[in-house]
């Protein structure tokens, strides 16, 4: 995908929760950024957040502009006003109706049970804000790069059907690449700095691998190069994947968001660079799942493992999408059908709508699910 060769260093972060704040606090360490904008739904909190980032940046010697904007993605006029005022060259979307982390607030036993439903059933929570932001950006017309961090593996292809696909996603597939690289270095007895990984995998794989050390019901294509030479992996492949769930285990939860933020930043930095850089990203140009890409400020292209083409990679990610609980995404309407067996897992604990998820009803479906999950949390906390 080709991008305008102008710089992408005016960055607006929409959805300024934990992930957005971690990203912003890394951006103020980099003098290449001209301006950073943060958003929120309350004017006082936005002012406080912008001041905190501004003063933190000053301590780091950051001389760029820091500003804050009141944005409610259910009020398109507020989003459009922020875009017109800030004039971003890049927008990073971290907005969601309900963070995945809410599940981790449940008891460990209940979390494990609901986690078996995978991530697909929660699609409306992430689709609704991302769709609203994409619509506002289209109305704005300034053509900023849009990086989506909210379930990009599935949100991207849904919005592609509507002509609203974000430029590229971030996180997920990229989150497991460092651990795979470290594990490969240990298993193969090679210096970690001499290895290069290319991974095609959907969110399901990146969620499962650190916990179980295998691909489960999905597929993934993993290539490891040593000094540019593709290595033939036999039994070592299983050992490398197993290593991610054993000697490469890491802290998760809210602290683990630091890794996700760093994955986002690999994409951001590549897209402001003149020189193409190999990064991993979900949903490049709206494709399903995650891919290795060569990215620069001029654009990006897939950089796949040897022996597979784009259609192979899409098939691998579509298999992963099914494992993640999504039976189908209609390429013409964007309507997503969630697997009934995955919805049945959630339905043991709160009401679930089994109808396909139509993008036009994304907000309604998100609020229904959010309210039902909130009732479950209240009941459990009172028990």
Image (spheres, rainbow, N blue to C red):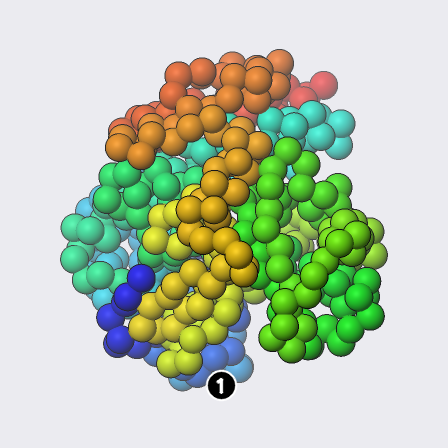
Left-right relation of 178 to 49: right
Residue positioned 57% across, 32% down in the render: 323
Q: Tell me if I can see residue 219 in this picture.
A: yes
Residue positioned 69% across, 46% down in the render: 209
**Secondary structure under the numbered disc 1 in the rendered image:** loop
In the image shown, does 325 or 227 lie closer to the viewer?
Answer: 227
Q: Is residue 7 above or below residue 41?
A: below
Image coords of residue 302 (percent x, y): 43, 60
Residue positioned 61% across, 64% down in the render: 197
Image quarter of the C terminus: top right
Q: Tell me if I can see residue 44 in this picture.
A: no
Image coords of residue 18 (percent x, y): 54, 54
Q: How many numbered marks, from 0 up?
A: 1
Locate residue 270: give its quadrant: bottom left
Q: Is residue 323 above or below residue 83?
A: above
In the image shown, does 223 or 76 lie closer to the viewer?
Answer: 223
In the image shown, does 259 or 53 lie closer to the viewer?
Answer: 259
Image coords of residue 82 (percent x, y): 25, 57
Image quarter of the N terminus: bottom left
Q: Is residue 258 above or below residue 195?
A: above
Q: Is residue 355 above or below residue 13?
A: above
Locate residue 258: give its quadrant: bottom right
Left-right relation of 92 to 195: left
In the image shown, does 365 or 183 lie closer to the viewer?
Answer: 183
Q: Residues within 10 Å of mark 1 (few under 14, many from 20)?
A: few
Residue positioned 20% across, 51% down in the render: 138
Image coords of residue 320 (percent x, y): 55, 38
Left-right relation of 135 to 304: left
Left-right relation of 357 to 350: left
User: Mark 1 — residue?
Assistant: 61
């Amino acid at each position: 995908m080709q991008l305008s060769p102008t710089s992408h260093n005016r960055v607006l972060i929409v959805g300024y929760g934990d992930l957005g704040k971690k990203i912003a606090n890394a951006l103020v360490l980099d003098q290449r950024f001209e301006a950073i904008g943060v958003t929120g739904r309350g004017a006082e909190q936005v002012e406080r957040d912008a001041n905190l980032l501004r003063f933190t940046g000053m301590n780091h010697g950051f001389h760029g502009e820091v500003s804050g904007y009141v944005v409610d993605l259910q009020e398109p006029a507020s989003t459009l006003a922020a875009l017109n005022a800030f004039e971003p060259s890049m927008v990073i979307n971290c907005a969601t109706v309900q963070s995945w982390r809410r599940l981790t607030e449940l008891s460990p036993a209940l979390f494990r049970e609901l986690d078996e439903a995978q991530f697909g059933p929660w699609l409306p929570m992430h689709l609704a804000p991302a769709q609203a932001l994409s619509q506002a950006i289209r109305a704005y017309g300034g053509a900023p790069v849009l990086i989506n961090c909210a379930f990009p593996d599935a949100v991207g292809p849904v919005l592609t059907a509507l002509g609203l696909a974000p430029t590229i996603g971030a996180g997920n597939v990229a989150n497991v690449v460092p651990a795979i690289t470290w594990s490969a270095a240990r298993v193969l007895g090679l210096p970690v700095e001499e290895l290069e990984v290319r991974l095609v995998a959907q969110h399901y794989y990146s969620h499962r691998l650190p916990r179980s050390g295998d691909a489960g019901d999905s597929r993934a294509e993993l290539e490891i190069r040593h000094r540019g030479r593709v290595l033939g992996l036999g039994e070592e492949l299983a050992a490398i994947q197993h290593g991610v769930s054993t000697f490469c285990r890491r802290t998760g939860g809210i602290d683990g968001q630091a890794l996700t933020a760093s994955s986002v930043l690999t994409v951001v930095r590549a897209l402001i660079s003149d020189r193409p850089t190999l990064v991993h990203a979900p949903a490049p140009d709206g494709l399903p799942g995650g891919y290795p890409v060569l990215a620069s400020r001029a654009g990006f292209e897939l950089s796949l493992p040897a022996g597979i083409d784009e259609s192979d990679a899409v098939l691998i990610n579509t298999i992963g999408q099914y494992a993640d609980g999504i039976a189908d995404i209609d390429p013409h309407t964007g309507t997503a059908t969630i697997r009934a067996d995955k919805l049945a897992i959630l339905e043991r604990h709160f009401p679930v709508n089994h109808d396909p998820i139509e993008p036009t009803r994304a907000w309604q479906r998100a609020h229904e699910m959010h309210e039902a999950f909130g009732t479950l949390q209240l009941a459990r906390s009172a028990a």
